[in-house]
Image (cartoon, rainbow, N blue to C red):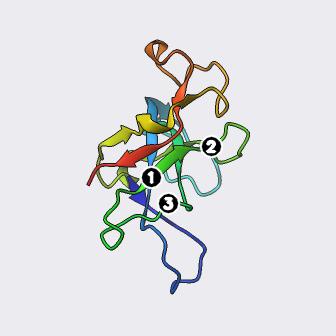
Amino acid sequence: MVLSHEDEDPRASHHPYWYAHIISIFHANIRHIGPASQSSDPQKMDFLWVRWFGHDMTHQAGWKALCLYRLGFLDHEDPGAFGFLDPAAVICGVHIVPAPAYGRTTELLPPSIARQPSEDDKDWVYYYISM
C-alpha cells in the first residue's frame, strides 16, 4: 500500500491509496556518474518489482456502503500494469483476499514469471482489501 497520487479534483472522492502485489525484491550496487552525482562510489539500492491493482470503480465500497473495497489487476497491456517502487514509499502491508464468487481469468496476463507456479497462470478477477 502506497499513497495515491491521483491527478483528480481534490474535492472528488477517491481512494487515498494504491495497492500492488510485490513480485520480487531487488538489491543492486549503483554508481551514479552524472553531473549531479555526489559520489562515484557504488551505493546500495533496494527496489521492488510490482504488479499494480486497479480499483473497481463500479463497486460501491467503504464505511458508508458497508462493503470492502474491490480491486483487480491491471491488464498486462496497460503501460502502468507493472513497475518498480522504492521500498521507502510503502506505508504498510495489507491483506488482500481473492473474491472467489467472480472466478478466475487468464485474460489479464498470459503465462508469466509474475505469478507463482501454483497459480496455474490464472488471476482472480477481483480481490477485496481486508479492513
Q: Nearer the viewer, residue 44 or 75?
A: 75
Choose the circle earlier in sequence order: 3 or 1: 3
* Left or right: residue 36 compared with residue 4: right
Q: Nearer the viewer, residue 69 or 84?
A: 69
Circles 3, 1 touching at the beta carbon (< 8 Å): yes
Query: Does 108 sit above or below residue 59?
Result: above
Element type at mark 1: strand
Amino acid type of the residue that numbered disc 1 sits on in the rendered structure: Arg
Amino acid type of the residue that numbered disc 2 sits on in the rendered structure: Ala
Number of marks in the rendered image: 3
Q: Nearer the viewer, residue 70 or 8?
A: 70
Tell me the residue that label 2 is attached to: 81
Q: Tell me where residue 109 sits by quadrant.
A: top right
Please name which of the two marks, 1 or 2, marks the residue nearer to the observer. Answer: 1
Please name which of the two marks, 3 or 2, marks the residue nearer to the observer. Answer: 3
Whole-angstrom CA distance, mark 1 to mark 2, is: 17 Å
Picture coordinates of residue 116 (x, y %)? 46, 18
Whole-angstrom CA distance, mark 3 to mark 1, is: 7 Å
Tell me the residue that label 3 is attached to: 59
Label ID, residue 28: none
Query: Does 89 sit above or below residue 121?
Result: below
